[in-house]
Amino acid sequence: MESVLREKQVLITGGLGFIGSTLARRLVELGACVTLVDSLIPEYGGNLFNIAGIEDRVRVNISDVRDEHSMKYLVQGQDVLFNLAGQTSHMDSMQDPFTDLEINARAQLSILEACRKHNPGIKIVFASTRQVYGKPDYLPVDENHPLRPVDVNGVNKMAGEWYHILYNNVYGIRACVLRLTNTYGPRMRVKDARQTFLGVWIRLLVEGKPFEVWDGQQVRDFTYVNDVTEALMLAATSDQANGRIYNLGGDRAISLKALADLLVEIAGGGSYLVREFPAERRRIDIGDYYANDRLIRTELGWEPAISLREGLAHTLAYYRSHLADYL
Amino acid sequence: MESVLREKQVLITGGLGFIGSTLARRLVELGACVTLVDSLIPEYGGNLFNIAGIEDRVRVNISDVRDEHSMKYLVQGQDVLFNLAGQTSHMDSMQDPFTDLEINARAQLSILEACRKHNPGIKIVFASTRQVYGKPDYLPVDENHPLRPVDVNGVNKMAGEWYHILYNNVYGIRACVLRLTNTYGPRMRVKDARQTFLGVWIRLLVEGKPFEVWDGQQVRDFTYVNDVTEALMLAATSDQANGRIYNLGGDRAISLKALADLLVEIAGGGSYLVREFPAERRRIDIGDYYANDRLIRTELGWEPAISLREGLAHTLAYYRSHLADYL
């Protein structure tokens, strides 16, 4: 995998974001020629600090995936596209459903059309979300689980991922989809819960303030960001992945209350309040979720390398040093 | 059902089309106050001849479901919205994916937003398609079958239907979805195969020319248009339908070759050629399909009343009298 990516031309949409920038660091180490596309919309995950230390080894192009003209130019000459840009907030997708549609669905179609017309030999890995499943019928959720999204974000991401699969199947534009669950780690957004609630927890903990746990009984799974980037690179370099959809999971499922306790323990202090779910979130909530990720383990040999305990410790350490750069 | 719809304010998008106009005829008979919205885009199903004889008993509003302003006005004061407007051609969706997205996905979201803001008490019945399933894993296909659309039209219709379900679940805007299979009957488009291949078959038969059967072994099911409008009305008047998705089927599944033979027999003559599937259609083809429609039969008491033989006879008779109005 590593030798395959060396000296490859790689484009990352959402490249200044949490996962995109972590991936960029790894690819730069491997010797890939990396271009990052990011819109730097303040409510999303892009942050120039995320590429501190590698800024001279990547090409940064500020533009929006909705901008068909820039995307048409940028996909040309690329070997691999890690297509990570997206609107990630479930609440925002309900308040402004059209922006979510434009980014998560329409822009995906226009990126694929650009590839079809101008670079059909490209390989694309698309970051989707467990949100497409909606409320699970059974746990752990495998890739055959029905798709019944419960918010606008879930519907649009579902459309976005299926455009990728059909461009693979119909036009032979090699593409695959990873359905991410809660990704966490250094460089995640901590200003608010738009990317993950865990960001807010960690910020408040570092600031010495109590954080809020809603309900607490809900069970979720978590993937450390470096394990996600490993999966993205495995998918990018495997022909078996073409046209496939893979769940990502973590080393274990855990209730939010137990997660909060673990975090406080690792931090060596801190406190939280358990409160009721806010009504407007409750109505789009999916309840318990954790993934069956056997398919990617079997087919691509992926395995999470970082335990939840280690990952949380790395993340806390990062924000203890760098919190100011994320506020 | 009939008494519930009497004197109701009813809006039909795609109201000058095949199914919309057939539904309008029935609703006008029942005494409903019917407004038809149609864009009359030449490539779609709208045809003013479809309302010949009832033109003074319906209100016709020429506008496009993509026009947010007209839709915002038109949904107000309506009791029921039969949301039937759509881009239906699979091939066109591949050649112009953005138009398909705008009509089948974005416009649906904007209609739902208009209802949420200006008429949350409305009841909506949305016409979706079996295309959302893609290539069946098993036959007959029930509503729990995975959704794996194989063309852009299927992806966008999938998004369109899930917006409806989630506006029902999150906002309490009563909405339900029917997944239609091949609908046929008087007033269908016969100029080309954009709505159904059966339209072209019947036109050529009436014109005394041979029609083309591709492959011939494929198995499909067919619903006569009046049975579809019955299902739409049942769904509109049932609270049990809210938030539900129902397949429609027909009285039997039949191979295309056997269908062609039946049609020639009913017509008392005519001929067809069997040829290979064109490559550009083959790659988005779903293979054999027929629906398991037990759910709507059980929950709403729907049952197709017209056999395939009767339905084809009515359809042939209609186009023998009115072909010129459809060319």
Image (cartoon, coloured by chain):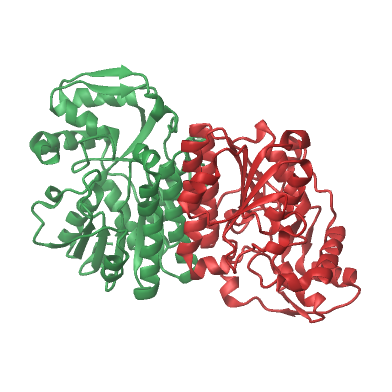
Chain colours: A red, B green
- B175 to A23, vertically: above or below: below
- Left or right of A19, for residue B83: left
* Residue that appears at 20% across and 69% down: B7
* Residue that appears at 10% across and 33% down: B320
- Left or right of A27, for residue B316: left
Q: Nearer the viewer, residue A72 or B281?
A: A72
Q: Give the image location of residue B151, x and y in percent.
A: 44, 39
Q: Give the image location of residue A295, x and y in percent.
A: 71, 40
Q: Nearer the viewer, residue B257 or B292?
A: B257
Whether residue B147 can be seen here: no
Residue A312 position by quadrant? bottom right
Q: Give the image location of residue B175, x and y in percent.
A: 40, 62
In the orientation shown, which residue stands out farthest toward the front?
A56
Q: Give the image location of residue B255, x and y in percent.
A: 36, 26
Residue B262 position by quadrant? top left
Residue B130 position by quadrant? top left
Q: Quadrant of the C terminus of chain A?
A: bottom right
